[in-house]
């Protein structure tokens, strides 16, 4: 009886936060779903009519749609590749006893706290600028012609900027997992004559598997919505070369004033994000069950 009363009290105390969370999620999603079936343009807000599936057909037939899907996958895949491999390498270095270890760790993690628009502006005007950027100065130093990154390699530029922001997060998670590795196991493997490469492949890497899976899961959810870096640097161009799905929705809503089409794109983005999340959650579950 006491247990039932305790459970009832716990549910009662949790109810306000659960209800607030549901309202916070369901109300915007419901409004987006409703607008996706409406013919609603901000240039003529008084003329709202039922459009059926027209907005979905319109958004699907947009020549930038499949390009934006591909660009989204390239950004997510490229950033994950850089951050996971780079995060493992930096975590291995930071795990070694070095002078000023605490300060070095703070400096390594600090890019994660820079706001995306600020980071994009720094990279655009101070590092990748073809006239006075750091990369341009390095190219001239070695006798090469400076590269106009955002005109010639727009998608790669976005991947580099976003990876620079998320690399500290991956490093922090992987370093925490690395420090939980039993030192006795490493000493035993070293005494048995295992090389550094063998210890990494057969001992360190399997131990980091769960942390790597968590990094991939969390980063993928956020990387699907990359927006500010594209807006500040390339504005989705040249053409649609760096337009991802999130930026295409912004362009449809605020540049094309088409709320109905943008809402349909938002629903499509939610569906795709949930599909990716389901696969990643299954991967995490399988990994944790091992």
Image (spheres, helix red, strand yellow):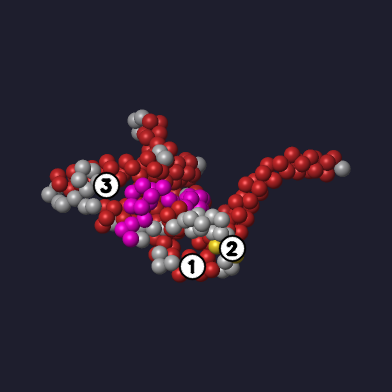
Q: Residue at x 66, y 49 (%)?
A: 22
Question: Of tags 3 and 2, which is closer to the observer?
Answer: 2
Residue 11 lies in quadrant: top right
Asked if residue 288 shows in the view, the reply is: yes
Which mark is on residue 2?
A: none
Q: Position of residue 49 (x, y in %)?
A: 59, 63
| Image position of 1 with respect to 284: above or below | above
Q: Residues within 10 Å of mark 3 (few under 14, many from 20)?
A: many
The residue lying at 67 percent from left, 44 percent from top is 20
Q: Which residue is mark 3?
A: 128
Q: Which residues are magenta?
A: 213-239
Residue 61: give x, y in percent of width and height. Answer: 45, 69
The residues bearing labels 3 and 2 have C-alpha atoms spaced at a distance of 47 Å
- Which residue position is annotated with label 2? 49
Q: Is residue 139 left or right of residue 82?
A: left
Q: Residue at x 16, y 52 (%)?
A: 145
Question: In front: 205, or 72?
Answer: 72
């Amino acid at each position: 009886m006491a247990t039932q009363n305790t459970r009832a009290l716990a549910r009662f105390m949790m109810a306000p936060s659960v209800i607030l969370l549901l309202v916070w999620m369901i109300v915007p999603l419901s409004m987006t779903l409703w607008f996706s079936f409406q013919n609603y343009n901000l240039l003529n807000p008084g003329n709202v009519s039922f459009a059926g599936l027209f907005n979905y057909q319109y958004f699907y037939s947009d020549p930038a749609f499949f390009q934006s899907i591909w660009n989204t996958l390239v950004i997510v895949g490229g950033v994950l590749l850089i951050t996971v491999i780079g995060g493992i390498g930096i975590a291995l270095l930071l795990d070694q006893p070095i002078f000023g270890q605490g300060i070095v760790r703070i400096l390594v993690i600090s890019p994660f706290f820079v706001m995306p628009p600020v980071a994009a502006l720094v990279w655009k005007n101070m590092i990748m600028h073809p006239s006075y950027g750091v990369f341009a100065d390095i190219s001239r130093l070695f006798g090469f012609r400076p590269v106009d990154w955002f005109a010639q390699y727009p998608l790669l530029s976005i991947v580099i900027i976003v990876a620079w922001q998320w690399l500290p997060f991956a490093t922090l998670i992987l370093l925490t997992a690395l420090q939980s590795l039993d030192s006795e196991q490493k000493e035993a493997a070293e005494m048995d004559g295992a090389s550094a490469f063998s210890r990494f492949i057969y001992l360190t890497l399997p131990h980091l598997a769960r942390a790597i899976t968590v990094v991939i899961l969390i980063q993928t959810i956020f990387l699907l919505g990359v927006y500010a870096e594209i807006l500040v640097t390339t504005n989705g161009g040249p053409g649609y070369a760096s337009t991802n799905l999130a930026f295409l929705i912004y362009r449809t809503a605020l540049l094309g004033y088409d709320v109905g089409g943008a809402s349909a794109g938002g629903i499509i983005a939610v569906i795709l994000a949930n599909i990716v999340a389901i696969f990643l959650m299954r991967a995490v579950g399988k990994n944790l069950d091992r």
